[in-house]
Amino acid sequence: MPPKRKSPSSTKSRPEKLPDTDKRVLQPTLDLAQQIYTQLDKGDIPRMKLPLRTKQNIAFSPRDGVWRLGNQCGVRSARKLDGALMLLRTFWLVDFIEEMARDNKHSTLRELYYISEQWEEAKFHSENESNLLVEDLEVMCERMREDFRLRPEENGASVIGDLTITEINRKGQKKKINCRDDVGDGGYQLPANVEKEKISFVSHGAKFVLAIECGGMVDRLAENGFDEDQNALLVHLKGQPARSTRRFLKRLNEELKLPVVVFTDGDPWSFRIFASVAYGAIKTAHISHYLATPGAEFLGVTASDIENYQLPSDKLSDRDIQALKAELSDPRFNTEMWKSEIELMLQNGKKAEQQSLAKYGLNYVTEKYLPEKLTEMGVL
Amino acid sequence: MAEELASKQKAISIGEFFERNRQILGFDNPSRALLTTVKECVDNSADACEEAGILPDLLVEITKVSEERLKVVVEDNGPGIVRRQLPNVFGRLLYGSRFHSNRQARGQQGIGVSAAVLYAGLTTATPVHIVSKVEEDPAANVVDLFLDTQKNQARLVKEDVLAWDRPHGTRVELTLKARYQRGRQSPYDYLKGTAIVNPHARIVLVEPDGTRTTWERASPDLPPLAKEIPPHPHGLELGELDSMLRRSSSKTLLQFLTADLSGISRRGIQDVLQKGGFTGRERPDGFAGERVEQLLAALKDTPMATPSAECLSPIGPMLIKRGLKNVLGTLRPEFYSPPVSRPPKVHAGCPFVVEVGLVYGGDLPSDQSIQLLRFANRVPLLFQQGACAITQTVAEMDWHRYGLEQKSGAVPVGPVILLVHVASTKVPFTSEAKEAVAQTEDITREIELAVQAAARNMKLHLSRRTRRDQAMEKFTIIQKILPKMAEKASGIVDKPVPDLTRVITRIMDVVAVEARGSGEDPTKPSEKTLLTLTNYTSRNRPIELFLEVPLEAVKEGFSADPKPETLSTELGRVTFPLQRLSPNAKVTYTLTWPKPEKLEPDDVDVFVAGVDEAHLLGADPLPGDWDVRLPAALVEAAEDAQIAAARPAATAEGDEEVDYDAAEKKESFVDEE
Ligand SMILES: Nc1ncnc2c1ncn2[C@@H]1O[C@H](COP(=O)(O)OP(=O)(O)O)[C@@H](O)[C@H]1O
Ligand SMILES: [Mg+2]
């Protein structure tokens, strides 16, 4: 007879020994259980407060130079189906984390989503829901998801340029890698964990970091030898950058004192990419101080570039226009520079891709556009 | 010579008449020509069947002969046409029998089947092939003929008799230059529309690629036959009056006014005579010129009784619903609005009726304009949608208030099919093409009122649905989530699971009636229905349940457990004894249906006394017209509730606060990681 599987809902196993760190990490969830138990016992509808992760509730922190979570709270209540489900899921999630702690396991966010198949009614309807709950837990416990033994998919970006690092590989060995000479065309792939214990900087010959939205543009600059000619470290953002990419940029900036310049498409979504690199994303506002690079600067493509360089453009879609309007009420974009850029884009009704610079030939971006813009910014 | 010229003149006029009026006649392009041909034949078949009291069985078969030619066969089980009339019906333009008749008929909508015969002859030089049998004859007559454009009469090319395997009926075969297309304005759409508004017909369509579609008969009852009535004076035109006078068999004007016109009272007749300066003894056939005009003016100037609506044949609410269900059932609509049939009204002396049906949801697309099905005298209108008073009236209504999206001045957007039927002895059309109802105040007003009534029903359904969804949500919370949450939290703090009654009643705060069928799908009617009445409020409550069930069910032996206190066979009303329910307590009623297959999900109305509307779920408060003596306890409870409702609501927790999960959903975090 096969051994009987422990019912996933079983909570009787709680007194079992948990590693101390995990116990400490999860302490706030025990408090939550106590709070909800008391509410139920008194006949009150279960509820908890959580700081709102909305654009109305982020505040600039002068100390960190980034936008962090404000102190407005929302209520998660069992009065509503969504709230009730999230409360119940929180307990399931804590059970799961404890189970992993006991077995010394880790899981990906995606695995967590599938694990919830065992959670009956409480199973997640989408991966977005499970990711949000993990972030809620981060906020609640003031920890990072890695502390809960959860990690993202390997979606880190790639780095090309003269930077030498050491990475502790899967076998526990320290590997020394130069991100220009020791890598193939794809560059050096950032792992999910880019902390000091995993990656340390050895040496570099770079003057600045150029963070680029699209892979095609990274390839163009690499093929044109831009990294060597201008001593640039190219970092591929891959659209909205993953946490590890943002964290890595911050480390380059803080530890190696390299200026970070962001080069994206010229559209509302790219403005948000820049905001999440430089100011902090709303969704991760609780860890902005850890992820965002306050000194990062926006190079382009700007709305004025589209005009000045006469770039081939597309008409703004309704969604684009909505996004731009939303940015006008986003406190992070409340600066003279951004207001005029956003308004100009709305006024002209045009957006352009970074690769539209190819209109003037393949070398134009490296010989003309970037040198001009970088000089203007005082980087070159 | 003059004779020769005369016949030529005529030839030119018929051919020219057709050429000039191709568009109006509906033959301006090959696909429209096909539709018009099908339409003329099908309308004739349906008219003939109804007149003869026969349930129509129609076959339409379209086959490809060559690249540009199609053969159209229309066969019916109607009364047949006697041999002597065949050349007239098919071989003469403008030989209709209904053109002048004063009652609702489809034929008025077309020029007549002979136009199709003419078109077929002109484009393919092929005669029409007719097989027709009347019951009295032992065999069917077979005739092939052309419409002779010179003489406007039939030119027979073949004639025969045939032993036909049916008692009566007509088969018409035409070969014409035409193109077959499915989709809007196709024969398929036309027949589908016809099937909806003629649920008493069975229609089979065979398309050129062999696809066979059958619209089964959905009703065994023929629509009541529209009666022919004399014209109403207010609808008369000068020429019409003139020829009526001339052809009248009445001996005097007085007799003419009494017998040949409808709606004039004795006083009215005196008025007319006086106003026109007539004695009443004039001979009708002696009227001419100015005198006819005088008579008409006097008639129009005299108030009269509205014309009788007996000359109309509306579809009726029940059959509209059946027709829609029969044809649209595969779309699984979630809601059929009770159809609206307005009382007859009069426009320009002609009575008319507006009827509306509405279907919502199911597989209908919610991001497109609603589908508008327009009908005049049971005939689908497929062209000139924009010019039609039906479309314009719908577009001018404000649909936001009924829960549909709408760009101003346009037909609304939503998962809706809206059927509008205008029936009249003389539907006013915008043009001779008779594809768009003209904007006239009387008719537009009626369309608006009918559509509004249907839209209100839809709105009611939508708000019921929202309430039901919210209720479902709450049930899920208290039945599935809360107990688990309590178990988990208690496990973590290592204490026994607390009693959840108070939390449950706080979340729900309603008295709920849940209905469940005993069958496989609990939402479908089945032999037994379980009605569970639960007091999810924090007070002890006296509660009484009432039902209104279909009369048929009561007659056939409907029963319930616990036993009803009273059961009325006249009204289908059922009352139950008073129940006292403490918080979280419930009582279940088992209803047994003798013929569940006849039951519709919304056939049973559930009412509850003792609970105010705001705290009632899945039932409505008992309507005042029930006239039942409620027990004192219930009356008191109702008064208490009123007092409680009048008091300012105690600050409900969570009122001022931001709902974290709702805020999170709204924020959408575009693309952020
Ligand atoms: N399929 C049929 N069965 C019986 N009678 C028919 C049929 N088709 C036509 N008729 C007769 O021929 C007449 C003329 O038809 P038509 O020219 O189409 O004009 P309308 O339909 O306006 O009367 C009809 O009124 C009807 O009496
Ligand atoms: Mg006809």
Image (tube, coloured by chain):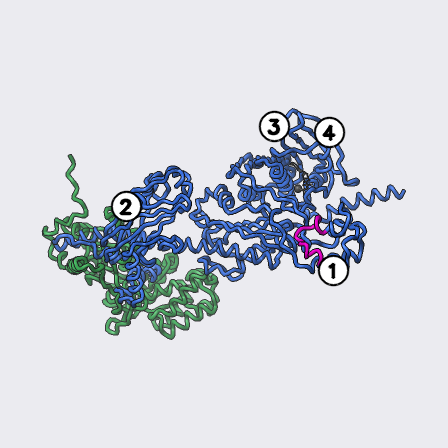
Q: Closer to the N terminus: mark 2 or mark 1? A: 1
Q: Nearer the viewer, mark 4 or mark 3?
A: 3
Q: Closer to the N terminus: mark 3 or mark 1? A: 3
| Left or right of residue B661: residue B83 | right
Q: In this figure, which residue is indicated by the disc labeled 3?
A: B166
Question: What is the C-alpha distance between the residues marked 2 and 3?
Answer: 58 Å
Question: What is the C-alpha distance between the residues marked 3 and 1?
Answer: 59 Å
Above or below, B210 against B267 in this view is above
Q: In this figure, which residue is indicated by the disc labeled 2?
A: B588
Residue B268, magenta (yes or no)? yes
Q: Closer to the N terminus: mark 2 or mark 3? A: 3
**How far across and how far down the image is residue B315, in percent?**
55, 45
Q: Closer to the N terminus: mark 4 or mark 1? A: 4
Question: What is the C-alpha distance between the residues marked 4 and 3?
Answer: 22 Å
Q: Chain of mark 1?
A: B
Mark 2 is surrounded, within 10 Å at the Cα level, by few (under 14), some (14 to 19) or many (20 or more) other residues, namely: some
Q: Mark 4 and mark 2, same subunit? A: yes
| Left or right of residue B296: residue B214 | left
**Label 3 is placed on what type of residue?**
Arg
Q: In this figure, which residue is indicated by the disc labeled 1?
A: B274
- Residue B245 visible somewhere in the drawing: yes
| Left or right of residue B166: residue A301 | left
**How far across and how far down the image is residue B390, in percent?**
57, 54
Is the residue indicated by label 4 positioned so its CB lies within 8 Å of ligand 1?
no
**How far across and how far down the image is residue B462, in percent?**
41, 54
Question: What is the C-alpha distance between the residues marked 4 and 2?
Answer: 76 Å
Image colour assigned to chain A:
green
